Image (cartoon, grey):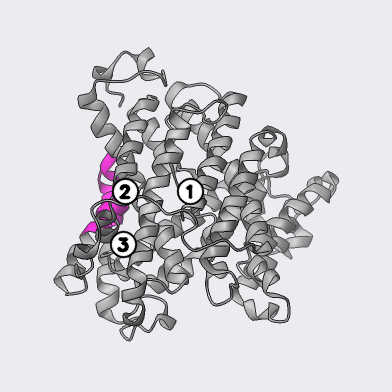
Amino acid sequence: MTDTSMGTAEQLRNPDYTPPLARAVPLGIQHVLAMFVSNVTPAIIICGAAGIGFGSDQAALGFPDMTYMIQMAMLFAGVATLFQTIGVGPVGARLPIVQGTSFAFVPIMIPAVSGMGTAGLAGLMTGVVIGGCFHFCLGFVIRRIRFALPPLVTGLIVLMIGLALVRVGIQYAAGGVPLMGTPEFGSLAMWAPALVVIFVTLAIKFFTRGFTAVAAVLIGIVAGYVVAWGMGQVSFANVGRAGLFALPSPFKWGVEFNAAIVLGMCFMAIVSAIETVGDVSGITKGGAGREASDSEIAGATFADGLGTAIGGVFGGLPNTSFSQNVGLVAMTGLMSRHVVTIGAIFLIIAGCIPRVGAIINTVPINVLGGGVVVMFGMVCASGVNMLSDVHWNRRNMVIFAISLSVGFGLQLEPSALQHVGKTAQILLTSGLLPAAGIAVILNLVLPEELSSESTEEVSGGMAGHGSGSFRRD
């Protein structure tokens, strides 16, 4: 319910309104807490894929790099959020939009930095910068390209993102990727804290209301962390070695151009831009009861790209608008962009203090795994929810079936591409780009006349009497 003690109903719907600081500061911190885990998790996953920070052989070398990437995740989430809330010229929607590290890019980034990759972190960050510049340019045309990405395509893409990540979640919950040399992988000692995270998250999510429910994953990870600490799985040895203040370093890992990474970043920028359009529309509808303007949508896209490009220069990963904070705006009924600006300032301050990143780095991989099992499962569920808006006729079933079969099949059996070049492997083995590419092309070229035909030929009769549930007349 809207708290009218913060202002009149008209003020609460005004993005330029600033509530009293006694209310604005905790509300700003609330926005940070709602997105915090999702924001730093991609950096930890990419470090794990690159062999940084996990395993006894990597600990001494990996600790500073992982801490640094966690710092950059916080710092440039704050910077990109300021681009959205305060704005610079045409950049920024000037709405209460919280930016954070995007999960959508993770399936593309993992093969880029893992053993399959040829450029490592230097190539990845170069790709992030170029992809961010491309993302910025999408702001000029974003309204014109939405037709190519209907719910059938966007739902499939989001579903594929989740499917590409769930394996990572299970590996982490079981103790890390086996190749990292974790002898306890899959043991009860590894699974116990992860299961605590999952069950506490579910309990908080379904038996509480308000902000507590929004921060369910964070609370679950705290509970799992306490259990892991009691089992002797938490080490604070590196925290004391972390500095109290540090500024980011440009091109920390160097510069290296890799065509596969650049292409992957640019394609996913299109997906991220469409996601941002949805988030901007959700904020204006949920908080102000109106449609988003063209300038707000373009400005938000510009801010996405600029934040990503600048972050990439200093070792940050791609940024995008965070949907959980869209829900928080609707829940509080407060549209003030200045409240979110306060949250962004907290993120920037935390990003300049290495010790904050070092403390986050003490979270055991299995505890993090419990949280990402929930988060990645929700990504899959979000994709399915988008697909529920699809009219499941013969045409759309063919598009979905072929795209999913090829994409998910390559994801399950990446060795099917062992004879293609490294560039193609990086682009194709996640399954995400093949599935998305096929869906976009088929959706554009298949004749609409197929839409009126029966689905029986495609389903082979399996739909039976329940086939009507797939149609929306």
Vertical relation: 261 (above or below) 414: above
Contact (Cβ within 8 Å) of mark 1 with mark 2? no
Q: Main secondary structure of the magenta part?
A: helix
- Please say if the residues under marks 3 and 2 sit with CB atoms less than 8 Å apart: no
Question: Over which residues does the magenta segment extend?
Answer: 201-222
| Image spot of residue 126 (x, y percent) | 58, 57
Q: Residue 128, can we see it?
A: yes
Residue matched to label 2: 352
Instruction: Provide residue 419's location: percent of width, then percent of height.
Output: 73, 81
- Secondary structure category for the residue under label 1: helix
Three-letter amino acid code at the position of disc 2: Cys
Q: Amino acid at mark 1?
A: Gly
| Picture coordinates of residue 59, whole percent (x, y) | 32, 75
Q: In screen coordinates, is 228 left or right of 453? A: left
Q: Amino acid at mark 3?
A: Ile
User: Height in image: 126 above or below 20?
Assistant: below
Above or below, comparing residue 471 to residue 143 in the picture: below
